[in-house]
Image: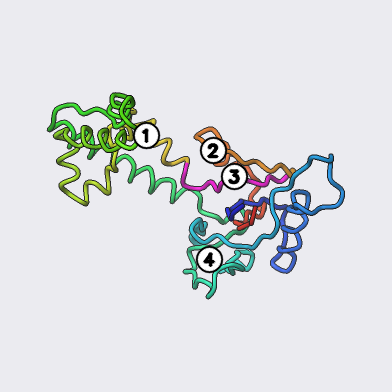
């Protein structure tokens, strides 16, 4: 049991009817609904709040004053004072989905290029899993310790760990993280910008999954929605 976010897609609705529309869309997935589809049916949520903290939408420039934008947060106390360029939801057509994806594409490409250039100055390194597999026959208490020690003996890893800024940028296991071509790396990171762990579609489907396929589907679904579709971030307890 815990809290996570879902992106709820709704037919056009004004500010006064938004919460009721969300309630109607979420109702089929309530734990305590009486008309259960079958005896073993289990719902998805016990309570929910309008809240996009941590996964806010950008507002398309020129539409910051649109009254349909959702700027209140039912969960955060005190409520966050959002800038005009950010919101918890609104009509799909005035949400700027492209700018944050483009920014992430630039960031990811820069990180990938910087790592490859840096790594070229050192002997080729191996990913952490190589060392974990090599020492797996040791006593359980010593497996990770021995693997980490061997992994850190590599000149490339030593150089990265010697610079906190590089370590933060390239992570603990950079050989694994950057073991893909530039296009694949950028695509994977861009796909992760917009999705929440779950999506409630216009036709009432609760989609919850992980991985690149789900994230790409999420992006394509939002991109294909009519411009007047309301898209709102919701925090729910499962």
Quick check: 113 left or right of 6? Answer: left
Mark 1: few, some, or many residues within 10 Å (few <14, many ≥20)? some
The image quarter in which residue 116 lies: top left
Q: CA distance from mark 4 to mark 3?
A: 20 Å
Name the foreground residue: 125 vs 193: 125
Say left or right for 177 vs 23. left
Alpha carbon distance from label 2 to label 3: 17 Å
> How many numbered dots are placed on residues in this image?
4
Foreground disc of the pair 2, 4: 2
Q: Residue at x 79, y 40 (%)?
A: 40
Magenta segment range?
192-202
Which percent across, then down, holds residue 78? 53, 75
Would you call the spot at circle 3 few (<14 residues within 10 Å), some (14-19), or many (20 or more)? Answer: many
Do residues under tags 1 and 2 come within 8 Å of each other at their CB atoms?
A: no
- The residue carrying pointer 4 sits among few (fewer than 14), some (14 to 19) or many (20 or more) residues within 10 Å by Cα, namely some
Could you say whether the residue bearing mark 4 is in a helix, strand or loop? loop
Task: Identify the secondary structure beneath mark 2.
Answer: loop
State the CA–CA distance, disc 2 to disc 4. Answer: 32 Å
Point out which mark residue 210 bears. 2
- Mark 1 and mark 4 residues within 8 Å of each other at the beta carbon: no
Give whichever of discs 1 and 3 has the lower sequence position: 1
The residue at which mark 3 appears reads as 222
Q: How is the image coloured?
A: rainbow
Secondary-structure class at tag 3: helix
Look at discs 1 and 3 and give the one toward the viewer: 1
Considering only vertical position in the picture, is 137 above or below 41? above
- Disc 4 and disc 3 in contact, CB within 8 angstroms: no
What predominant SS class does the magenta segment belong to? loop
Q: Is-magenta flag for residue 94?
A: no
Instruction: Find disc 4 in the rendering and name its residue.
Output: 64
- Identify the residue under disc 1: 185
Q: Is 175 placed above or below 26 here?
A: above
């Amino acid at each position: 049991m815990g809290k996570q976010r879902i992106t709820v897609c709704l037919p056009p609705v004004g500010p006064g009817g938004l919460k009721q529309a969300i309630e109607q869309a979420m109702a089929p997935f309530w734990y305590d609904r009486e008309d259960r589809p079958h005896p073993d049916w289990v719902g998805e949520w016990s309570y929910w709040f309008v809240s996009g903290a941590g996964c806010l939408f950008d507002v398309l420039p020129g539409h910051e004053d649109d009254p349909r934008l959702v700027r209140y947060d039912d969960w955060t106390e005190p409520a966050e004072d959002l800038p005009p360029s950010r919101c918890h939801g609104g009509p799909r057509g005035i949400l700027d989905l492209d700018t944050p994806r483009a920014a992430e594409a630039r960031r990811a490409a820069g990180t990938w290029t910087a790592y490859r250039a840096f790594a070229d100055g050192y002997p080729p390194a191996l990913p952490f899993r190589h060392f974990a597999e090599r020492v797996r026959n040791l006593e359980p208490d010593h497996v990770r310790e021995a693997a980490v020690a061997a992994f850190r003996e590599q000149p490339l890893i030593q150089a990265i760990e010697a610079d906190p800024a590089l370590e933060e940028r390239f992570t603990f296991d950079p050989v694994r993280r950057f073991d893909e071509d530039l296009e694949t790396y950028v695509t994977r990171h861009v796909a992760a910008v917009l999705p929440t762990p779950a999506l409630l579609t216009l036709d009432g489907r609760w989609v919850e999954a992980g991985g690149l396929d789900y994230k790409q589907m999420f992006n394509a679904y939002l991109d294909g929605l009519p411009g007047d579709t309301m898209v709102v971030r919701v925090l729910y307890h499962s």
